[in-house]
């Protein structure tokens, strides 16, 4: 269905164009919106987007905070080695860190 494809394409564009600045660098708010948007894509077309992790990490790396970036890069390295990825795991990482979920 062409309208479904267009809708999925728009949602994918929304994911790939997210920036932490748009959320005042509030990681939980951004991840919640990212997850919600991704779930909408899956509901419309389960083949529409197969690599949300990479896009999420790209959005998180838009921060200018070096400590935050280093923390994200450590998560990315673990993910690249095969560690399971979940949105909750990423959020918990920041809740337990000194970064207080805000990348500034």
Image (tube, rainbow, N blue to C red):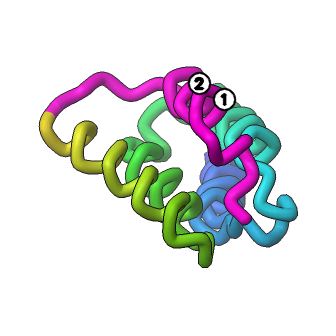
The image quadrant that residue 42 belongs to is: top right
In 3D space, how far apart are the residues under numbered discs 1 and 2 (Cα atoms)? 5 Å
- Does residue 73 appear left or right of residue 22 in this picture? left
Look at 83% across and 68% down and name the residue there.
22
Rendered view: 47 above or below 8: above
Q: Is residue 3 visible?
A: no
- Does residue 81 appear left or right of residue 84 in this picture? left
Quarter occupied by the C terminus: bottom right
The image quadrant that residue 20 belongs to is: bottom right
Rendered view: 14 above or below 38: below
> Which residue is label 1 attached to?
95
Q: Front-most of 95 and 86?
A: 95
- Residue 38 placed where, x, y %? 62, 39
Q: Which mark is residue 92?
A: 2
Q: Is residue 55 visible?
A: yes
* Residues packed near mark 1 inside 10 Å, few (<14), some (14 to 19) or many (20 plus): some
Q: Front-most of 37 and 92?
A: 92
* Residues packed near mark 2 inside 10 Å, few (<14), some (14 to 19) or many (20 plus): few
């Amino acid at each position: 269905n062409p309208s479904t494809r267009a809708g999925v394409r728009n949602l994918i564009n929304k994911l790939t164009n997210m920036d932490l600045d748009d959320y005042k660098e509030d990681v939980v708010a951004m991840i919640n919106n990212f997850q919600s948007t991704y779930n909408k894509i899956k509901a419309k077309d389960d083949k529409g987007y197969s690599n949300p992790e990479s896009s999420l990490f790209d959005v998180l790396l838009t921060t200018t905070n070096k400590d935050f970036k280093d923390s994200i890069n450590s998560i990315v390295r673990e993910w690249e080695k095969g560690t399971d990825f979940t949105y909750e795991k990423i959020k918990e990482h920041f809740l337990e860190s000194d970064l207080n979920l805000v990348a500034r």
